[in-house]
Amino acid sequence: MALWHFSLILVHSFLERVWNRTSSLYITLYFFAIGDNITTATHNTFHIPTPQTLILMALWHFSLILVHSFLGVDAAVFTLQNRCEGIIWPGILANGGIPQLANGGLQLKPHESVDINAPTGWSGRFWARSECSFDQSGRGSCTTGDCGGILQCDGAGGAPPASLAEFTLDSPLDFYDISLVDGFNMPVSIVPSSGSGNCSESKGRVVACKSACMAFNKSEYCCTGEYNDPKKCKPTNYSEVFKAACPTAYSYAYDDATSIFTCKGANYLIRFC
């Protein structure tokens, strides 16, 4: 009886989580697997399910997990939009152990946009590369944001200076920010849609220079070593220049209070320029 009740809780929790994200195939599987095999309550009497029914439930739940893994559950849709006058080459880097999106990079012509689906729990960063030249094999170089001389970064990060749009999805909220900690190479903004919570727009505007950390490589600017502590690593004259121009963007490593935003169940427009 307890096992049956626990199974129902698991099934209900799982279906509720994926209801708005997946196809009706889950419901089809439910009725196909369960059918008339579940003993139900009649005349105010609840019958304990047979061992065969419990085995069937376990097989159904396992099948549901397999289908879920095959279909995937999209946590968000990222729309990358090029509002610049020239071609840009967005780079994408997922955090360790998380699937790379769009093989890590692509080309966007002026005023072109592309939608990219991200799975549940995805986290990583987007940035724009500029003045790139690639051959037919996808090898070449970029003036800013280069990721090892390849079109599809596929796990390689962008060389600073680079303006970053950073995301952590479903933790359980979505966290996102614009970071200029590694310097600036192009204006970028994040515009959430169809979400709930503090879904504010985060912007990075025109500031064309390296970060103090990159320029001087000193612990007090990079918040490393003995300065790897928010109580010791404070804003500097250099980071305040970035902050004045981009009030909602990260200007140094511990600039959390005014720079990170949360949302739930949203899609995100990432605008370059």
Image: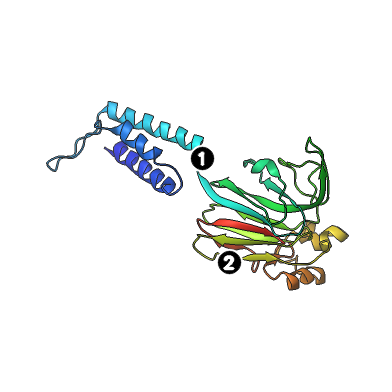
Q: Is residue 8 something one can see in this rendering?
A: yes
What residue is shown with label 2?
200
Query: Which residue corresponds to the image point at 77% horizontal and 67% vertical from the top-left?
Result: 206
Dot 2 amino acid type: Ser
Dot 1: within a 10 Å radius of its alpha carbon, few (fewer than 14), some, or many (20 or more) residues?
some
Quarter holding the N terminus is top left
Q: Is residue 154 left or right of residue 237?
A: left
Using the numbered discs, state the Cα–Cα distance from disc 2 to disc 1 in whole angstroms: 28 Å
What residue is shown with label 1?
72
Query: Which residue corresponds to the image point at 19% horizontal and 35% vertical from the top-left?
Result: 47
Q: Is residue 255 something one can see in this rendering?
A: no
| View extreme (left): residue | 43
Residue closer to the observer: 91 or 249: 91
Q: Position of residue 97 (x, y in %)?
A: 63, 40
Q: Position of residue 248 (x, y in %)?
A: 67, 68
221 vs 168: above or below = below
Q: Position of residue 114 (x, y in %)?
A: 63, 50
Image quadrant assignment for residue 51:
top left
- Indicate the secondary structure of the residue bearing disc 2: loop
Quarter holding the C terminus is bottom right
Dot 2: within a 10 Å radius of its alpha carbon, few (fewer than 14), some, or many (20 or more) residues?
some
65 vs 166: above or below = above
Q: Mark 1 or mark 2, which is nearer the start of the sequence?
A: 1
